[in-house]
Image (tube, helix red, strand yellow):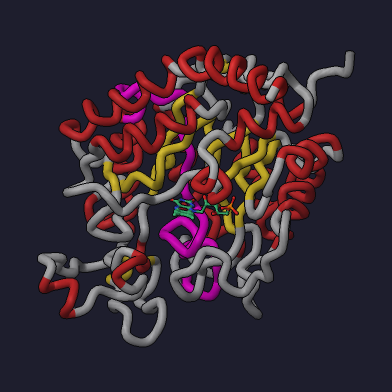
Amino acid sequence: MTSTPLLFQPIELRGLRARNRCVLSPMCQYSAKDGFVNDWHLVHLGKFAQGGAGIVFTEAAAVEAIGRITHGDIGIWSDDQVPGLRRITAFVKANGAVPAIQLAHAGRKACMQRPWYGNAALNDADRGRGEEPWPVVAPSSVPLETGWLMPHALSREDIRELKAAWRAAAQRALAAGFEVVEMHSAHGYLGHEFLSPLSNKRSDEYGGSLANRMRFTLEVAETVRAVWPEDRPMFVRVSSVDGVEGGWAIDDTVALARELKARGVDVIDCSSGGIAGPATAAGVKRAPGFQVPFAAQVRRDAGVKTMAVGLILDGPQAEAVLQAGQADLIAIGREALYDPNWFLHAEAALGATGEYESWPQQYGWWLTRRAKAMAKA
Ligand SMILES: Cc1cc2nc3c(=O)[nH]c(=O)nc-3n(C[C@H](O)[C@H](O)[C@H](O)COP(=O)(O)O)c2cc1C
């Protein structure tokens, strides 16, 4: 009998045990109203717990209303938003997966159109739908691109208030039953805007040197870690590189990862791009597994666990990443939209179980008999 593939061996992170090393990557649904989750989010996320993921991440949840990317983002800036989220965590747990939340602030990339309305700055057509723009904030008054809103540069007092918003959001996440928290510091959103010299033009202690540009992300990480229980893991998602001349580079990410680890961050989630333009990986050439080398380098050079993400397409590819010691966890995004049972299918493809052993019994019982009938046909 062959041993269980690494991808489907449980993993322990602090006091938490996930049934396997597959993670549903955070994916905005742009389907919330006033930041409240609804049945769409419950069914959407519930599918991946039923589909065998070890950890299921919510999409970016805004820590304050002006930190939403679009009018359709989910939020966690109010206690009233907790009960809806609690329904999701309860369902995810009941289906064997670990519920995880990504806390986020969009900074100067806030106030965008939903992708299907254009993925650009809000315009008159959006106003016509009742989607008014709001004032956006950033480390410096530098808009994303021409035609985008001019952000208000955050003062030290604003930053203090923002940290309080992150703290309160983390406390609400706990109250909602999440077992993993991730700080979003990637894709050109607020944390990343402080990190990258392309968007951070400050001359105070939050700008200039690498240490100063890292300060905001490190302080927010400390703030969240301080209220997040010792026995629960914390992740930080980074854009490992800007992929733009003069931007944030992989050596910077390694330096940041070391500092985050020292502050009790357990996993660095290695994405890339997004500092210019709306797309996440702008400036970084995409091919299967294109961000895996970042996860590998951070893991090796900073000595911290990493999550690999980005065009990881099937079980054997994911297993090879883990076997090569390039990452500890594998996040799956669009493949799971295409096939919500991606995780169960990968498990079978890797020969980890009998064909339907891990499926929810409501499905597996029937599918086993269906397979037998088909074999005889
Ligand atoms: C619809 C959609 C929404 C996304 N929303 C988020 C998000 O809320 N937070 C985030 O960090 N990344 C977000 N991403 C990026 C994914 O988490 C993932 O990193 C990316 O899609 C690459 O992985 P994949 O090739 O497996 O899809 C989103 C991607 C998609 C397709």
Residue sitting nearer the eye, 110 or 226: 110
Residue positioned most to the front: 377
Residue drawn where x is 40% and y is 27% of the image: 227
Q: Is residue 180 left or right of residue 255?
A: left
In the picture, residue 102 is in which quadrant? top left
Residue under the image location 68 percent in, 70 percent down:
285
In magenta stretch: residue 184: yes
Position of 290 with respect to 83 (left or right) is right
Residue 192 place in picture, x, y as percent: 50, 60
Residue farthest toward the right in the current orientation of the protein: 1
Q: Is residue 239 left or right of residue 185?
A: right
Dividing the picture into quarters, in which one does residue 252 lie?
bottom right
Image quarter of the N terminus: top right
Place of residue 17 in the rendered image (x, y in percent of width and height, measured from the top left): 60, 16
Q: Tell me, yes or no, whether the highlighted magenta stretch contains residue 300.
A: no
Q: Name the residue: 21% across, 68% down.
A: 135
Residue 186 image offset from top left, x and y in percent: 52, 56
Please give the range of residues in magenta: 173-200
Q: Nearer the viewer, residue 101 or 50?
A: 50
Q: Residue at x 29, y 24 (%)?
A: 86
Indicate the position of residue 37 as horizontal and vertical percent values. Answer: 25, 39
Q: How many marks?
A: 0
Q: Is residue 147 above or below residue 51?
A: below
Q: Residue furthest bottom?
A: 146
Up-down relation of residue 98 to residue 28 (above or below): above
Front in this rendered view, residue 343 or 112: 343
